[in-house]
Amino acid sequence: MHIGFIGLGNMGGPMVRNLLAAGHQLSIFDLFKPAVEALRSAGASSVDSITDLAQSDVELIITMLPAASHVKAVYLGEKGLLASIAPGIRLIDSSTIDPMSAREVASAAQQQGNPMLDAPVSGGTGGAEAGTLTFMVGGSVADFNTALPVLQTMGKNIVHCGAAGNGQVAKVANNMLLAISMIGVAEAMSLGVSLGMDPKTLAGVINTSSGRCWSSDTYNPYPGVINGAPAARGYSGGFGTDLMLKDLGLATDAAKQQKKPVILGAVAQQLYQTFSAQGHGALDFSAIIKMYTGED
Ligand code: NAD
């Protein structure tokens, strides 16, 4: 299939490589030219503008952009995709944005005859490279089924979450819970260790008891508990604190619009905001345990 791809960063770059490896023809665009060049050497063709991509003979365009403002500019802007795209070309936005913006863009696309899915991912850059991402997909069942084979070349778990925007709903709800559970594990581990427990023994008890969760048994924030977790390598790599802070902002904004309390989500947002302001934005989000251990 001839696929267009916009947004060739940490996630989009490896996703394009997996599409190329699966035999697809790729036309790519990014404002950052070195990212384009790297993928041209891998076999993709580049176009000079979003308009050129919209007017090419692609059957599908995938976007992987930083935030809602970029997504709106790329789709709804004066020289954006919807200004010049032919009806029938399918659209998938895999950026993590708020559900309301996702619904606004999908509705504009549908109105001019371009089926659109929101399909944010989890799994990080490792999952993007390995082609094992989880895609949370919002849109019609028919559009989901059409997109499935392409999404399967980049991911392992492809979940239909309901109508347009619901992929983003699943993503913000999951990541808010992840932040809360990580802070909970950090708090419990640092309390237990300060009271004299060996961290590995404490994690072992938690992980065979009712406190067990992904943040405790797979991604434990206490150094030395899990080989291979970011805590074992100075919190480098993994899922950055600033990306978690962004997702918590999406969750609390969505909650405000719905007039729904997210009390723990708001506390988690404040903790990550404080941690980021202290200069730790680039560290993996499990480094939040430093707020409790007092380590620099
Ligand atoms: P990134 O900043 O590395 O890449 C974004 C790319 O979009 C950049 O290359 C940038 O030049 C390009 N871009 C921005 N505006 C553009 C425009 N108008 N036209 C063309 N290109 C434009 O970001 P990333 O880490 O790849 O993340 C992308 C999305 O995936 C974000 O929404 C992020 O929240 C989400 N996400 C990231 C991770 C992760 O671990 N990095 C995990 C899950 C989800």
Image (tube, grey):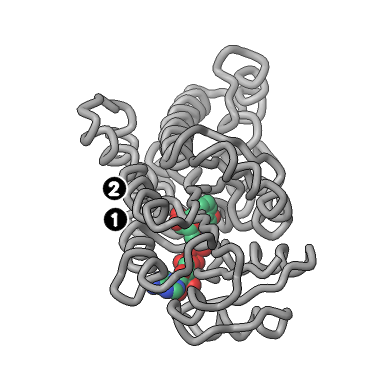
Drawn side of residue 208 relative to residue 235, left or right: right
Which quadrant would the N terminus be assigned to in this image?
bottom right
Percent from the top left, x then y, of residue 223? 59, 42
Question: Is the residue 234 above or below the residue 99 in the image?
Answer: below
Q: Secondary structure at mark 2?
A: helix
Residue drawn at (50%, 43%), measured in percent from left and top?
286
Q: Nearer the viewer, residue 265 or 278?
A: 265
Please give the residue where the numbered disc 2 appears in the rendered image: 274
Residue drawn at (47%, 25%), measured in percent from left and top?
188
Amino acid type of the residue tagged 1 in the rendering: Ala
User: Is the residue marked 2 within 8 Å of ligand 1, measured from its CB?
Assistant: no
Task: Give the numbered dot on residue 277.
Answer: 1
Query: Where on the picture, by quarter, is residue 260?
Result: top left
Query: Where on the picture, by quarter, is residue 292?
Result: top left
Residue 296 seen anywhere in this rendered image of the structure: no
Percent from the top left, x then y, of residue 232? 63, 48
Count residues near mark 1 (Cα–Cα under 10 Å), then give few for <14, some for 14-19, many for 20+.
few
Count residues near mark 2 (Cα–Cα under 10 Å), then give few for <14, some for 14-19, many for 20+.
some
Residue drawn at (45%, 56%), measured in percent from left and top?
113
Q: Nearer the viewer, residue 118 or 112?
A: 112
Query: Where on the picture, by quarter, is residue 126?
Result: bottom right
Amino acid type of the residue tagged 2 in the rendering: Thr
Drawn side of residue 83 relative to residue 155, left or right: left
Percent from the top left, x then y, of residue 48? 49, 87
Residue 98 seen anywhere in this rendered image of the structure: yes
Q: Secondary structure at mark 1?
A: helix
